[in-house]
Image: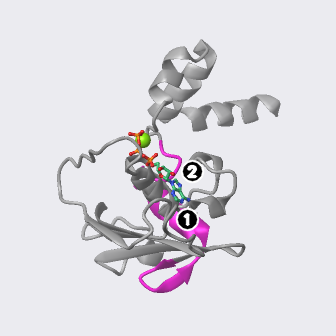
Amino acid sequence: MRFTKLRLAGFKSFVDPTELMIEPGLTGVVGPNGCGKSNLVEALKWVMGETSAKQMRGSAMDDVIFGGSSNRPARNFAEVVLHLDNKSRVAPSMFNDAEDLEVVRKIERDSGSNYKVNGKEVRAKDVQLLFADAASGSRSTALVSQGKIGQVISAKPSDRRVLLEEAAGITGLHSRRHEAELR
Ligand code: ATP
Ligand code: MG
């Protein structure tokens, strides 16, 4: 499943609707400090089902909504739309009849988020599962956020091991071993 297009509106610093085509190959985002590069990566995490406000560098999930600037008033909702190419038909069965998938997450101030896939309302869990199998997903080890490299270098060896095991995909084995030992 390839990401083909990202659209943001009212999300963090992207107050006006902004559309980005994601072409095959490597994509780089460049720009001065504070221009919104990390906000773009967070938009990807968010539309894939991130549930922690802290992971989005906020204290509450409503903090992803444009909060106003010196010359623009705050908005009351934010929306992120991610288009996926599903020609290889690898999406979970509930989504697999479509060649292109349009995943939409919208949040309204004080009333939480909702998700739609190709216009149909779905649960957060459905969206999280859609990306979990594709090894992307909001918590995937494939998303390395700013400052994380420094954290890895200065981490205690035991914490670093957890990270490496997660990356190697053996964390599940450990928890199953632990479960077996308790029996
Ligand atoms: P750096 O190069 O320093 O990593 P960056 O390009 O990654 O910068 P971001 O961290 O993505 O920049 O963007 C930060 C900007 O987004 C700040 O100016 C901040 O005020 C703005 N911002 C974040 N959340 C909101 C919000 N809810 N409403 C309005 N602006 C926001
Ligand atoms: Mg940044």
SS at mark 2 in the image: helix
Task: Check contact, mark 2 vs mark 1: CB within 8 A.
Answer: no
Mark 1 CB lies closer than 8 A to ligand 1 = yes
Q: Which residue lies furthest to the right in this view?
A: 183
Q: Which residue is drawn at 55% across and 83% down?
A: 121
Side of 154 relative to 19 (left or right): right
Side of 121 relative to 134 (left or right): right
What's under tag 1, amino acid-wise? Gly
What's under tag 2, amino acid-wise? Met
Q: In which quarter of the image is the C terminus?
A: top right
Q: How is the image coloured?
A: one colour
Image spot of residue 122 (x, y percent): 56, 78
Mark 2 CB lies closer than 8 A to ligand 1 = no
SS at mark 1 in the image: loop
Q: Which residue is drawn at 57% across and 56% down?
A: 50
Q: Is residue 78 above or below residue 155?
A: below
Question: Magenta includes 52?
Answer: no
Q: Which residue is drawn at 33% across and 80% down?
A: 98
Q: Give the range drawn in magenta.
A: 116-140
Give the number of the mark in front: 2 or 1: 1
Question: Magenta includes 138?
Answer: yes
The answer to which quarter of the image holds residue 107 is bottom right
Image spot of residue 36 (x, y percent): 40, 51
Q: Residue at x 64, y 47 (%)?
A: 54
Residue in front for this viewpoint, 172 or 115 = 115
**Dot 1, crowdedness within 10 Å: few (<14), some or many (≥20)?**
some
Residue at label 2? 56
Ligand 2 shows up in the quarter that is top left
Q: Residue furthest front?
A: 71
Residue in front for this viewpoint, 98 or 147 = 147
Residue at label 1? 68
